Amino acid sequence: NYDNNSEVDDEYFDHPGKNFQFKKLRLRIKNGTAGLYFGDTLIFSFNYNSQKDNTDNFYVSNLGTVEQFRNQGFAKKVIKEFLNFTRKEGKQNVILDVYKNNLVAISLYKSIGFKINIDYGDHYEMKYKL
């Protein structure tokens, strides 16, 4: 299972990024954290947890791309890979929160297939149905 104790290490994939040096990237999912690395440099990461409640949900939090690597498609690629992992685990949904003023993130999540599930006033809960 890909829960807080699960591990996927050194999963490589190609990225047709703007910069040719980023052809091979390493995705590491371990101990509740997913990270994308180029060599030893962390490019994008987030935390995940399937034990927040007793449902078939994965909760994702603290998503972030290092500033110099933004707008190159890394976040989208990693989130899609993570959705594949959670799908294999038989989960029903992936849930995250995002502040309403973070329009770039909202647009990214919607482009992947997340939908606004709950409006909390200053932020949304967004859900991806697997």
Image (cartoon, rainbow, N blue to C red):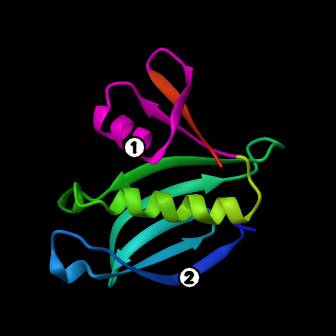
**Residue at label 2?**
9
- Name the residue nearer the viewer: 98 or 111: 111
Q: CB of mark 1 within 8 Å of CB of mark 2?
A: no
Q: Which residues are magenta?
A: 93-122
The tag on residue 99 is none
For image coordinates 72% across by 69% down, the residue present is 5
For image coordinates 17% across by 80% down, the residue present is 20
- Name the residue nearer the viewer: 19 or 113: 113
Q: Earlier in the sequence, mark 1 or mark 2?
A: 2
Where the N terminus falls, by quadrant? Answer: bottom right
86 displayed left or right of 63: right
Residue at the right extreme, as displayed: 54
User: Measured from the top left, where is residue 96 in percent x and y?
Assistant: 54, 40
Q: Could you say which quadrant of the image residue 127 lies in?
A: top right
User: Measured from the top left, where is residue 28 in percent x and y?
Assistant: 51, 75
User: Measured from the top left, where is residue 26 in percent x and y?
Assistant: 42, 80
The tag on residue 111 is 1
Residue 42 seen anywhere in this rendered image of the structure:
yes
- Name the residue nearer the viewer: 100 or 12: 12
User: Measured from the top left, where is residue 81 in percent x and y?
Assistant: 51, 65
126 displayed left or right of 44: right
Q: Amino acid at mark 2?
A: Asp
Per the image, label 2 sits on a secondary structure element best described as strand
Q: Is residue 106 magenta?
A: yes
For image coordinates 37% across by 76% down, the residue present is 37
For marks 1 and 2, give the CA distance. Answer: 27 Å
For residue 31, above or below residue 123: below
